[in-house]
Amino acid sequence: MTKLKMGMVGGGIGAFIGEVHRKAARMDGGVDVVAGAFDIDPEKSLAQGRNLGLDPRRVYRTYKDMIAGELALPKEEHIDFVAICTPNHTHFPIAKACLEAGFNVMCEKPMTLTADEAEELAAIVKKTKLTFGLMHTYTGYPMVKLARDMVRTGDIGKIRKVVVQYPQGWLFRLTGRENMQASWRTDPKRSGRSCAMGDIGTHAANLAEFVTGLRITEVLADLTTFVKGRRLDDDGSVLFHMEKGAKGILMATQIASGLENGLNIWVYGEAKTLFWKQEDPNCLHVLDQTAPEQIWRRGNAYVAAKSPSAARCTRTPSGHPEGFFEAFANNYVNFCDTIRARRAKRKPTALELDFPGIVDGVRGMRFINAVCDSSEQGNVWKKM
Amino acid sequence: MTKLKMGMVGGGIGAFIGEVHRKAARMDGGVDVVAGAFDIDPEKSLAQGRNLGLDPRRVYRTYKDMIAGELALPKEEHIDFVAICTPNHTHFPIAKACLEAGFNVMCEKPMTLTADEAEELAAIVKKTKLTFGLMHTYTGYPMVKLARDMVRTGDIGKIRKVVVQYPQGWLFRLTGRENMQASWRTDPKRSGRSCAMGDIGTHAANLAEFVTGLRITEVLADLTTFVKGRRLDDDGSVLFHMEKGAKGILMATQIASGLENGLNIWVYGEAKTLFWKQEDPNCLHVLDQTAPEQIWRRGNAYVAAKSPSAARCTRTPSGHPEGFFEAFANNYVNFCDTIRARRAKRKPTALELDFPGIVDGVRGMRFINAVCDSSEQGNVWKKM
Amino acid sequence: MTKLKMGMVGGGIGAFIGEVHRKAARMDGGVDVVAGAFDIDPEKSLAQGRNLGLDPRRVYRTYKDMIAGELALPKEEHIDFVAICTPNHTHFPIAKACLEAGFNVMCEKPMTLTADEAEELAAIVKKTKLTFGLMHTYTGYPMVKLARDMVRTGDIGKIRKVVVQYPQGWLFRLTGRENMQASWRTDPKRSGRSCAMGDIGTHAANLAEFVTGLRITEVLADLTTFVKGRRLDDDGSVLFHMEKGAKGILMATQIASGLENGLNIWVYGEAKTLFWKQEDPNCLHVLDQTAPEQIWRRGNAYVAAKSPSAARCTRTPSGHPEGFFEAFANNYVNFCDTIRARRAKRKPTALELDFPGIVDGVRGMRFINAVCDSSEQGNVWKKM
Amino acid sequence: MTKLKMGMVGGGIGAFIGEVHRKAARMDGGVDVVAGAFDIDPEKSLAQGRNLGLDPRRVYRTYKDMIAGELALPKEEHIDFVAICTPNHTHFPIAKACLEAGFNVMCEKPMTLTADEAEELAAIVKKTKLTFGLMHTYTGYPMVKLARDMVRTGDIGKIRKVVVQYPQGWLFRLTGRENMQASWRTDPKRSGRSCAMGDIGTHAANLAEFVTGLRITEVLADLTTFVKGRRLDDDGSVLFHMEKGAKGILMATQIASGLENGLNIWVYGEAKTLFWKQEDPNCLHVLDQTAPEQIWRRGNAYVAAKSPSAARCTRTPSGHPEGFFEAFANNYVNFCDTIRARRAKRKPTALELDFPGIVDGVRGMRFINAVCDSSEQGNVWKKM
């Protein structure tokens, strides 16, 4: 396995998601972090570079410097891809610049600040033919892949209804300037039109489309800012319609006191029902009106038999809990294997291509627009 | 404790809910079933009377006969109340006749076929000053009463959001003529405007109002008939607004394969969150962003300290599961104690009055109308 | 269905288990309580008789008076059976006297104070050919019957190991005179050689034998009195061997702070594993190294197909929780149907005979003796 | 943070635990794998070195070669420690040689093949003053550290009883030569006196001692080989006594069909009860006879307030599941920080020293001896 060289934008000292990217990318030994522009403060960026043991010449002041600096190196020393872990509003210009300079990109979500930016970025990806990953962590869980494969193979029957909820509690009160994580997420300039819907509603919508294989066609949303003084929604309820007559409910809230990261999904098919919950990620529940409930657990032969994609994304025997980092790392593994395949002039396999990307990003931005439009216009249906 | 004499309409051989009424009414030794018009077929009615060991003279052909027959007895031998366990469309005429003849009534839900009937019945109850109970079983569970009392005493903080779901699977397919239970429920003439919303959506709405102490002010519904050939909705998703700015989502479905009787409710307050699930009724979960989740369990001293109403409705020490029959019986206990208090010319206490009644019935019928109107008119807000 | 007439010994005002017997016996409409000697204080006995609406002539001062009084009635008015709900040390003389007077008996457990009494009682039952029930409540749960039937039909494979635990917390501290329930249970004169093992260890042993169909052959026990000042064991750990090479662990404790009535059992067979937990009685977990875990739930057609005995002991559709009273009532139903069959000179069916009785009682007393002997003699193996 | 250089013995291609060591050691960016003797087949060792991107000069034929080769390098290039991931019987000679050559050691468990070897190794560690870690993974979970800290600070009260169980199912049948993992574990020459007790019973005993802070003083064991043809125990039941009057039950089995890695522990104190389960590692249950059950979840401020050690071992916000790799990595973090502290001539803090080591290893070997002796000698108490 060729080691890939990763450059980072964002992920400075104390940043949560940047460190997750590093741990996840490194987990399976296929990626080295070799360059970065970690902070808008160059001193802090350098300090983070030192922490990470990087060659100081490859710790840059800005992403532009990083692009220039890396291009100045011999081609075989270049970074192979850039991980973008900055606040939402900077994703687009950074991703655009990286792609146009020829670098593959793994981007945090939501992909851009606006849907227009998302469409533009999609065009760039198409043109450059580079590999673009979007970090929808939760579809990286093997039991989510198993759920999708059960739907795909018809075990669940035609999908009738989906209920997807994402309750969190961390914004249940207004902190002075809210905490570091919260401050930019509730600032329209940096976060976009929505807080709860942008930050977690998009994950919920993405999960619903991923598992069912159906696209959401229209939404009707009721967004709320429950905490006084906050500038963006911290809660939303959404009815939605999908292709082929499926219907659904999406709930995303950040004011649910005591709820941690409670993403969960129910999928009701004509034959069976699926249930999965992020906080218990190694289990997939399969219910059936005519038979006992089943709990499928990661790492068993019966999972591998149904879902090679889930089997590929498992590292330990059953009963050894895998979690958030592994889900994250699964996206990196497939993203990197796709890069390797293309390097080798080989068409990536379906298993390798099983990571979220530009299409998910565009749909996420359209989702945000549609739910915000719906809510602002009086809770009416909006096409997506 | 004076034994009360109960007459039944409905509850013939093989009928599910009638037998539940008998078991529940009898559970605590305060009620005897002494009369009944159990079936529209007089032979079957008589057979059921024999099963129950009744005096054959008090097994009647029709409810009208029962009213007449009982009134013909010496006053002290009269039945004290009538339990109405017939299909929906007959609740109103029977209840009306019983009340007008001077009998207290315990009625199955939904209370009537239309909202107009409900309003009329409310007027009759008001005029007659008789005791009227409506069998919303689920608010009879002690942990639901505890939840309400936690909200009332301010532990949960101002309510922001409620998510109440009632998934069932028993109508996930169309059976030849559907089964006995299902056939009348999916027949508009006998069931009213709605199947899923009338049968279980009303329970969900009632539970949300009961626990929060807030009324639903308006609804926006998306009802569906997923099973081809069925004449009424078997699924519905509802957004709702409550008094004091609370918002909510209600889901009721009967096509959720493998789900049994999965009523559950999340209540998100400014301070804490409550979760309760009908299939695990002896537990109430209390979540808090700043402290460990708590599981309160029926039968403990700490429950009694917070909710005398819950304590009153508990029969066994903690750890001895109480279930559906006990919830049902709790409604009977309070209903009967209210009758006894009024007999004794005493104002019933708040604890005695803690059973669902005419107000819940009127609201239930308005709820059905509002969600049906909303859905038929294109998913628009309808006042309730 | 012929109504049976029940007399009670014990079950005075405020007594827990006597009221459970009444509720359970009455639940399905086949039993009337018509006589009783409810309390050693005749005034209190009379008061309880009044509460229950009994004919005062059939409220007796002592069980001896009850026997005499009932025998003096015309034969067709006699009580059909006696329910014995008194402290342990009185079970034997009462049961003996009732049987010898010709009355069937339903007895609380443990059956007697000593194993010798148990053997003597067994001889009397054999001689009189009367119906004798012993209230091992927990084998009355339908999912326990299903578990047994899965073992019987070979689904689980040859049994290798059983782990049965019964943790409770209610004796975790010494109360002044302990509470009413506790005081006699921790008094050797009234409770016998053991508190924890007699009160709940016997339930655990009975459950293990019931589900596996194997008898415990020998035990090695380590009993403890953790709470200073208590006179009997409040905790015990037991290794045991069963027929056909199966082995097991039994734990019963009453000092497990916060545990309520946590009886649970794991059965490990050559093919599959079973798990059942009293506090979640409507579920039976079936685990299999080669397939997803299954959760079987009471009230479904797939349960009835595997266990007619479980199906017979279910009153509500799946998802409507049944609990402790129903388990209790199931034992009464089968006990009473056996009495009815014998009255009708018909051999009771296997389904009717599916209730705990004299054999269970003898084994329970032997179990207590064996574990007490083992513990007193230095934790050595004792045959049972 | 100084990066430490790790050498490995074992962990060849396809080996499970070696790869876990690498992932865990690397997780937080403080360790590089730079050398190894990965396989007894030198070609395979080289291949694994290539996979890992190592300098081929540092991929050795044997651990002796590795020691010699590393010592031949300039001191600042030496590996800082050796991770030993080979079958049980080789742990001792390798660990001994490494320590005597001056290398710190992280060793898989059980530490040695015999208790004598364990004592000898302890003497060497003492003499060399080097840092020795033993990979008892499960005490690396933050909620296990929280449990220990709750006991330490008196929240639970004096410990009365401990029930620790470790059920697995992967050896429920004999495979032809059993699978790769199983073959050496069931071979006395490579695995030692015990399979189930050595492999997982030691984890259970270690967990019980870790959480309670009490040592097991004596054991009484009943070991069994349920699967015909297997040469070592695949199941065991153990009664044990601890310091200060605590008692316990330990169960470890590998024939529990469908159980995966079900290590769990109940700790019953005079005030409260603790429950933790490896397959749901982010939760710690605290039960209390006088208050609702609490579920403490990793990553919350209330956990950090009670247990700085747990807080130090958490990488993501609450609700983002951490699992097996993170527990493993926590042991590496503290082990490495202890090495760093000693390098810096600083006394390691209690937080840094919070990893399992030589004392745990010696106790583990004594445990194996004691349970095997007890079982062989007829289930008698054996001092530990």
Image (spheres, coloured by chain):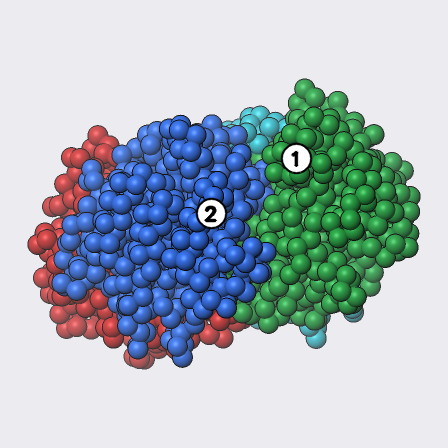
Chain colours: A red, B blue, C green, D cyan
Q: Mark 1 = which residue? A: C49
Q: Percent x, y for residue B202?
A: 31, 53
Q: How many neighbours does mark 2 have within 10 angstroms: few (below 14), some (14-19), or many (20 or more)?
A: few
User: SS for tag 2?
Assistant: loop
Q: The residue marked by circle 1 belongs to what chain?
A: C
Quarter holding the N terminus of chain C is bottom right
Distance, label 2 to label 1, CA atoms, is 28 Å
Out of A145 and C133, give the one closest to the viewer: C133
User: SS for tag 1?
Assistant: helix
Task: Tell me: B281 left or right of C97.
Answer: left
Task: Tell me: A260 left or right of C279.
Answer: left
Disc number lying in front (2 or 1):
2
Task: Tell me: B125 left or right of D122.
Answer: left
Q: Mark 2 = which residue? A: B73
Q: Percent x, y for residue D99?
A: 64, 44
Q: Percent x, y for residue A324?
A: 40, 53
